[in-house]
Amino acid sequence: MRHTISESSLSMLNEFISANMGLLFPKNRWPDLKRGIMSAIRDFNHKDPESCIHWLTSSPLTKSQIETLASHLTVGETYFFRDKNIFNALEMHILPKLIHARRKTGKRLRLWSAGCATGEEPYSLAILLSKMIPDLSDWNITILATDINPRFLKKASDGVYTKWSFRGTPEWVKDRYFRKTKDGHYRIDPMIRKMVSFSYLNLMDNCYPSMTNNTNAMNVIFCRNVLMYFSPEYTRQIVNRMYRSHVEGGWMVVSPGEISHQYYSQFNTVHLNEAILYRKDGRQAPSEKNFKVKPRFPIQETLLDNQRYFQQEILFPEQTDTADEIMPKPPEAPPEPRKSQEPGQPSYRQALKLFERGHYTEVAESLHKLLSRDQNDADAMTLLARTYANKGNLGKAAEWCEKAISTDKLNPSFHYLLSTIMVELGRVEKAVAALKNVLYLDDNFVPAYFALGNINRQLGKLKESGKNFDNAISILDGMQTEEIVPGSEGITAGRLMEVIKFSASQEAAHEK
């Protein structure tokens, strides 16, 4: 049956969505809004869109209901290696420099596909890295893939695709990294599948960056075809959080023309071939009038030890021109001091404000000055540890965390912080020991159960993992949904519950 929706109902729905979800549907996008509500009425057990709209706008909705609606209003349309200019910039310029630098400092890379939809984007990143790094097994590679739509995440985790997901993709990608199924679909290679970690995350929530959900210290963040759905206020908040989620020198990858470049003013704008990207480098970003000025730092022309891999197959060989520069021209004058940098001695509160804005280099400088006056300030030590972790310097992070523990051995949050650092360093035994210390000191520390469950799952200890998750869920059941979980860096009980349940269901599906 064909249903019509009045303009007054669409206007009412648009106002409701904007106020409650931060999503923006101007009148020229009302056809998208209409299609979204038409596809959502079944999930909400309504037979016609008008009654569904009036129910939505007159009843308090749960987070689950809001996210169900959001899943129908956003598009999961994607394919492998979408936007050849961006992937060429990654392969020929960004990743070679990162790989070269990380070979000397721990062989670690961290990437995040925010709004990963059905998984083609994070798997494309995994394929590219496997192609470029010959000694991949020696590296600690994190590819985090998050989305608000559980159905998308389920499909992504399964890793089975139709030919439509390969449109415009070089044939060797499908031949080398997929296996054809009996029904003519294509299943991702298990090694590539293991490189990607899928997780539920709503970008509107104030739960990132956080070591608890692995959204900190990223070298590259992809956030494409996502921000265009949000209102200006929410867009600014999301971009600011992602700025904080980057290490210094980290790269932000967005869709060209998706939103105004003014939203990325804290980043530096970088032109690479026909791609425009954004880079966090700790300096004041160029003014708007300089956005189109070509950068002036030449790319290093010395051969990297993995260059033979670049010479085999560029993903899209017709795109062969190279950029002359990779960094924007620095400001001619030093940037003015930020408001939080008051004259006189720094305080912990000032350092915390800088930390919350993602200015990690300045945080470290302030905290070192603070600790030179008070060598037993354990809170300053742990903030310094978190700062170094967010900068990607895990050695320094561990050093300062252990100093904090020696100052206050009975603080469970200090031991928990140490465990997260040890996980990133690949020192599993030390991470487990730290988590056991946490639970000895506080047997209701939910993030420790969650972390221990993840470690045991990775070790194949599924019974122990299940018990850890059950303990976490049992404690969360006794908390209010919107209550912040202690030690989680701002994650609510309801949100962590959903993350744990998704992790458990994902594992169960793979065991079948």
Image (cartoon, rainbow, N blue to C red):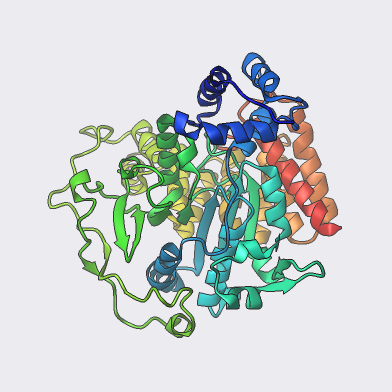
Can residue 296 be seen by looking at this rendering? yes
The x and y percentages for residue 149 are 65, 42
Q: Count of labels shown?
A: 0
x and y percent of residue 125 in the render? 54, 64
Task: Identify the residue at the far top of this view.
Answer: 58
> For the point 66% across and 65% down, which residue is it?
163
Relative depth, front residue between 18 and 77: 77
Task: Give the image location of residue 475, x and y in percent.
Answer: 75, 32
The residue under the point 41% across, 76% down is 318
Residue drawn where x is 35% and y is 47% of the image:
364
For residue 269, side relative to residue 181 (left or right): left
- In-front residue for pair 361/240: 240
User: Relative to 14, is 417 above or below?
Assistant: below
Question: Residue extending furthest front?
Answer: 2
Q: Which of 236 and 54 is in front in this view?
A: 54
Work out which quarter of the rendered image holds the C terminus and state it. Answer: bottom right
Residue closest to the far left: 333
Tell me which corner region of the image, top left, top right, bottom left or bottom right, holds residue 165: bottom right
Where does residue 82 sit, x and y in percent of width and height? 51, 61
Let me know if residue 449 appears in the view.
Answer: no
The quarter of the image holding the N terminus is top right
Q: Does 286 sit above or below residue 193? A: above
Query: Where, by quadrant of the figure, is residue 441 drawn?
Result: top right
Q: 105 above or below 30?
A: below
Q: Residue at x 40, y 32 (%)?
A: 232
